[in-house]
Image (cartoon, coloured by chain):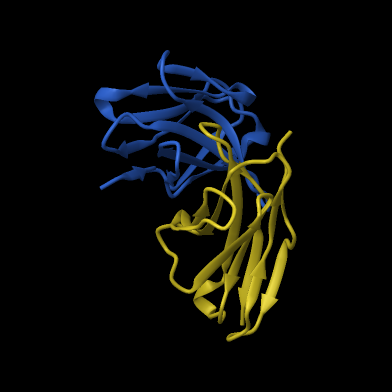
Chain colours: A blue, B yellow
Amino acid sequence: AQSVTQPDIHITVSEGASLELRCNYSYGATPYLFWYVQSPGQGLQLLLKYFSGDTLVQGIKGFEAEFKRSQSSFNLRKPSVHWSDAAEYFCAVGDTDKLIFGTGTRLQVFP
Amino acid sequence: DVKVTQSSRYLVKRTGEKVFLECVQDMDHENMFWYRQDPGLGLRLIYFSYDVKMKEKGDIPEGYSVSREKKERFSLILESASTNQTSMYLCASKQGNSPLHFGNGTRLTVT
């Protein structure tokens, strides 16, 4: 069955610390991969996407993600977190028709 | 920039009422989607549409229907609202391989 797992429900980091949010998936073929961010009361905003090619992709707001086929993972990283990064983050996988979303990771940032 | 507009940010309805959630996109996208978002469950696909007057069931269509009479507008209908349909509803659109573009959501409370 197709699925997306975000094992961390809630992560707390200090401002300036590095960040890694985990995403693992189960999918029949190589999927399209996405990370979205949702600020309170808002819709989802695309951070980055992977379709093919270089497995390290750069996104907005200083985020990057690495596709590892052997581990079925697409982890999101940021070298130095800012207080404004506090939000909920969703990993999604799928094809051109529709996406499957993970359950989200809520990021809290302490000053 | 793509704009997906959901007509209501907050709605409060009574059990048994017929509820319409409206979504409009301004980029001539062919594909439109309705998701519901619940804590700990992430986003779950209710219905989607590839074209005018076409609709496909998502993962949780029970209790919902949709209407797409014009390309830019995709309506979600709760025929007889129930308390378990209290949720955040997110509309999204896309074209081809492009990522999903989301509206800001409608928070529906059914009492």
Seen from the viewer's position, the closer of residues A30 and B65 is B65
Number of dots carrying numbers:
0
Seen from the viewer's position, the closer of residues A105 and A71 is A71
Residue at x 59% of width, y 27% of height:
A81
User: Image quarter for residue B30?
Assistant: top right
Report whether A52 appears left or right of B94: left
Seen from the viewer's position, the closer of residues B58 and B90 is B58
Provide residue A46's location: percent of width, then percent of height: 59, 34
Residue at x 48% of width, y 74% of height:
B63
Seen from the viewer's position, the closer of residues B105 and B26 is B26
Provide residue A8's location: percent of width, then percent of height: 40, 43
Residue at x 32% of width, y 22% of height:
A68
The C terminus of chain B - image quarter: bottom right
**Position above or below: B92 against A52:** below
The N terminus of chain B - image quarter: top right
Residue at x 66% of width, y 79% of height:
B13
User: Image quarter for residue A82?
Assistant: top right
**Position above or below: B19 against A47:** below
Residue at the extreme top of the image, as rendered: A54
Provide residue B54's location: percent of width, then percent of height: 52, 56
Report whether B7 appears left or right of A83: right
**Position above or below: B64 against A34:** below
Provide residue A48's location: percent of width, then percent of height: 54, 27
